[in-house]
Amino acid sequence: MTAMVVEHLFLSPQRGAPQQACAQLELRAGQGVVGDRHQGRTDWSGQNLTLVEAEEIEAFCALSQREVDWSLTRRNVVTRGLRLNDLVGKTFRLGDCLLRGVERCEPCRTLGQRLENTVLTGPQVVSHWLGRGGLRVDVLRGGTLRIGDIPEIVEGGA
């Protein structure tokens, strides 16, 4: 596996509120990020945790002519060094946690509306993020996730 590292961590305690940058996150199995607005929600699989690639944020910010904002996609974890799409269906360790990549985290109209500007319309924003929006993850074993953590694929699943 290509080296991947966690560069930024965020939690969002309330819907629509600014994300809070963190040095570490506590995860609970089947619950997600402690203190996050999605903690404990089970509306669908992959709702526990979301990841996005730093490279994709940088590319989008360059395209839309804006300053780099690591929280703009509202994902919990910003990584560098691996296509997250490759982790769909895979179980991996990150920090003390055991995680399962469930599905790609595709963009929604709300993201498009939030990130549109004079350079890109809402639909253009959504189109740009298709296939680049990150990864939805289930937390199989909780623990602490820290900036600098590097994942390890678990052979044969959990």
Image (tube, grey):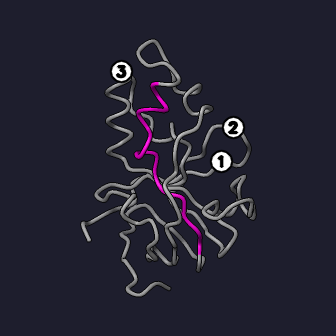
Residue 4, image quadrant: bottom left
Q: Eyeballing the image, is 112 above or below 22?
A: above
> What is the secondary structure assignment of the residue under circle 1?
loop
> What is the secondary structure assignment of the residue under circle 3?
loop
Q: Which residue is mark 1?
A: 12
Instruction: Please tell me which residue is depicted at 50% across the width and 78% down the height of the picture.
Output: 96
- In the picture, measured across the screen, residue 47 lies left or right of residue 134, that is right
Q: Earlier in the sequence, mark 2 or mark 3?
A: 2
The type of residue carrying mark 3 is: Gln
State yes or no: discs 2 and 1 in contact (Cβ < 8 Å): yes
Q: Which residue is mark 2?
A: 17
Tell me the CA gap for discs 2 and 3.
24 Å
Q: Eyeballing the image, is 61 above or below 34?
A: above
Q: Earlier in the sequence, mark 1 or mark 3?
A: 1
Residue 45, image quadrant: bottom right
Verify whether residue 148 appears in magenta: no
Give the magenta-colored segment's residue range.
124-139
Verify whether residue 133 appears in magenta: yes
Instruction: Please tell me which residue is depicted at 44% across the width and 73% down the height of the picture.
Output: 90
Q: Position of residue 57 (x, y in %)?
A: 39, 39
Q: Residue furthest left?
A: 2
Instruction: Please tell me which residue is depicted at 54% across the width and 49% down the height of the picture.
Output: 75
